[in-house]
Amino acid sequence: MKASKVAGKGVKSLSAEGKSPTAGLRERKRQETRERLTRAAMTLFLERGFEATTIDDIAAAADVSRRSFFHYFASKEDVVAAWQEGAAGTLAAEIVARPADESMLTAAENAIAAAVKRLDPAEAAAMSRLKRDNPALRARDQLKYEKLERALADGLAQRARTKSDRQKARLVAMIATGAMRVGGESWIGEGAREKPEAFVRRTFDAIRAILE
């Protein structure tokens, strides 16, 4: 009976996901290697600087070959993009989870504050300086904010009930993303002394003062 149940589960898994156990294990190993490369690269970037870190350095630190590196990333810039690629999805989930009685602006503020609260301030500051001082990384950062704006708009749109609410969601997403960008630059400019969450709150207070 037990063997039958186990076999049944296996069949269900295959039909639901269309993958064999071997394929699932292979994918899991690929993801683990990708994450190991990302962690190794970010550690080296923060220790040595972006330009001083070579692809060979990253591969060695992650215990893979240089050739293997290019199975996962086309460049060092791609590693930085991978490090922050989960931010948009996390932010959208935070937005959707906010209480229904919060205004869109308040929901955006609270979601962003919750997201930055999980950051290591020293690491976030170091990464911001790294991107600020490297033209290629600054260009990638622009794409990050575009993704964040779309994620915010999508999350806020799920709270919308009317067509005008959906338009409002896009406007709030644009304002909130701009606040994150300007606020982040100001935070670094002031020496990153304040906790990121407190800076988010202060930035949204400034937005409300302007809108009023």
Image (cartoon, rainbow, N blue to C red):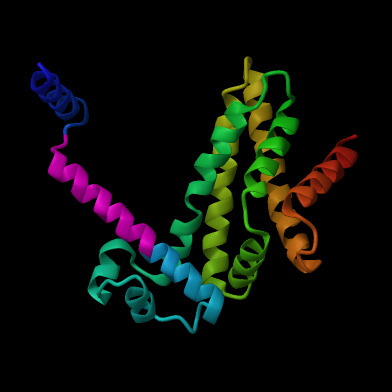
Q: Quadrant of the N terminus?
A: top left
Q: Which residues are magenta?
A: 19-36
Seen in the image, is 90 located left or right of residue 75?
right
Q: Percent from the top left, x then y, of residue 148?
A: 57, 45
> Residue drawn 33% across and 67% down?
74
Q: Percent from the top left, x then y, of residue 194?
A: 80, 58
Q: Quadrant of the C terminus?
A: top right
Q: Nearer the viewer, residue 146 or 193?
A: 193
Q: Nearer the viewer, residue 177 or 18?
A: 18
In this view, which residue lies farthest toward the bottom?
52
> Residue drawn 58% across and 27% down?
96
> Residue drawn 53% across and 44% down?
88
Would you say the magenta stretch is mainly helix, strand or loop? helix
Q: Nearer the viewer, residue 208 or 115?
A: 115
The quarter holding residue 152 reads top right
Q: Is residue 24 magenta?
A: yes
> Residue drawn 78% across and 69% down?
191
Is residue 100 shown above or below 53? above
In this view, which residue lies farthest toward the front?
2
Q: Percent from the top left, x then y, of residue 130?
A: 59, 72
Is residue 2 shown above or below 57? above
Is residue 177 shown above or below 33? above
Q: Percent from the top left, x then y, of residue 64?
A: 27, 71
